[in-house]
């Protein structure tokens, strides 16, 4: 019997400017996403991934300590608890990216993974932290991830997570493949300009190199008061051959749903024996500083 997983990714704009009270911003974003999650469930999605730090603006456009107050523990914070309820309600695996507070003064850019029963499966913490362009001051807010490249075994497939800037680094994408990932989600917040031409290049390349599905998510719109650029959406799924099989618009809140044939992974791996032909013993310089 074919292994078909119906997966959803959600892109959304932030309706409340970042200079408004934090509670107002988070409430508006959560309410918006509850409706979009329900839409994904109505379309039959069995797995759903939200965008990077889904319950707020991309506050890394500035360096202000007030944003530390938006971080929550995983899994005991209110947002993950709410999403556990949603996962159970809809019978849907959820990937929930939020700002994580591990302890006082220690914060990560993370994603909680929840199975369809509402059980918390674990956390991915973003490894690669940019601090190189105006408006992307992430080292002010996040420590580099320290939980490795976990793959979460769910009823609907083996799921890995890579977050935003991670996508520029093929090493972690390969680690996820070697760890057994069948679907890798990359929730992002990226604006038009410098890296846009890479958006549909790098992640299909990861899919081809590792023969798995990729779900790439980007938020939409201009976020005030910073307006560092246009978050250009275009969230998509690509298959193990690197073909984009479903894609969202550039500027609208949208739920993208695709049927992922997990048996295709083995078919493609039987054709392209990249893992068989790896020469790991010869890559001696790749882990050197």
Image (cartoon, rainbow, N blue to C red):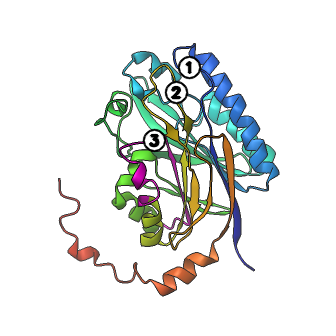
SS label for mark 1: loop
- The percent position of residue 98, horizontal first and vertical second, equals 54, 35
Q: Which residues make up the magenta segment?
A: 179-202
In this image, 163 relative to 74: left or right?
A: left
**Residue at the image position 50 percent from the left and 19 percent from the top:** 69
In this image, 156 relative to 229: left or right?
A: right
- The percent position of residue 15, horizontal first and vertical second, equals 63, 25
How many residues crowd mark 1 within 10 Å: few (<14), some (14–19), many (20+)?
A: some
The earlier-in-sequence mark between 1 and 3 is 1
Residue identifier under label 1: 17
- The percent position of residue 287, horizontal first and vertical second, equals 23, 59
246 to 110, vertically: above or below: below
Label 2 and label 3: CA atoms lie apart by 12 Å
Residue 148 visible (yes or no) = no
Label 1 and label 2: CA atoms lie apart by 7 Å
In this image, 43 relative to 269: left or right?
A: right
The one nearer the camera, 18 or 5, is: 18
How many residues crowd mark 3 within 10 Å: few (<14), some (14–19), many (20+)?
A: many
The earlier-in-sequence mark between 2 and 3 is 3
Residue 212 inside the magenta-drawn segment: no
Residue 191 inside the magenta-drawn segment: yes
The one nearer the camera, 119 or 260, is: 260
Q: Which mark is residue 223?
A: 2
SS label for mark 2: loop
How many residues crowd mark 2 within 10 Å: few (<14), some (14–19), many (20+)?
A: many
Residues at marks 1 and 2 touching, judged by CB atoms closer than 8 Å: yes
Residue identifier under label 3: 190
């Amino acid at each position: 019997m074919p292994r078909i997983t119906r997966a959803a990714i959600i892109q959304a704009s932030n309706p409340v400017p970042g200079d408004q009270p934090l509670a107002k911003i988070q409430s508006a974003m959560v309410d918006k996403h509850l409706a979009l999650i329900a839409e994904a469930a109505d379309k039959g999605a069995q797995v759903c991934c939200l965008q990077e730090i889904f319950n707020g603006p991309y506050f890394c456009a500035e360096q202000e300590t007030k944003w530390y107050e938006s971080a929550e523990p995983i899994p005991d914070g209110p947002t993950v608890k709410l999403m556990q309820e949603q996962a159970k309600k809809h019978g849907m695996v959820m990937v929930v990216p939020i700002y994580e507070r591990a302890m006082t003064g220690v914060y990560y850019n993370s994603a909680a993974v929840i199975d369809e029963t509402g059980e918390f499966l674990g956390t991915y913490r973003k490894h690669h932290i940019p601090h190189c362009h105006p408006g992307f001051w992430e080292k002010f807010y996040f420590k580099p991830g320290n939980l490795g490249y976990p793959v979460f075994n769910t009823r609907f497939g083996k799921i890995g997570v890579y977050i935003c800037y991670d996508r520029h680094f093929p090493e972690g994408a390969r680690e996820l493949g070697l760890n057994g990932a069948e679907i890798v989600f990359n929730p992002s917040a990226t604006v038009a300009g410098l890296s846009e031409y890479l958006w549909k290049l790098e992640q299909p390349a990861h899919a081809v190199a590792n023969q798995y599905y990729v779900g790439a998510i980007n938020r939409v719109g201009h976020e005030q008061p910073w307006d560092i650029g246009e978050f250009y959406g275009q969230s998509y799924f690509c298959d193990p051959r690197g073909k984009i099989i479903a894609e969202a618009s550039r500027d609208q809140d949208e739920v993208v749903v695709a049927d992922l044939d997990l048996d295709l992974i083995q078919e493609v791996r039987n054709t392209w024996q990249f893992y068989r032909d790896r020469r790991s013993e010869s890559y001696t310089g790749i882990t050197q500083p």
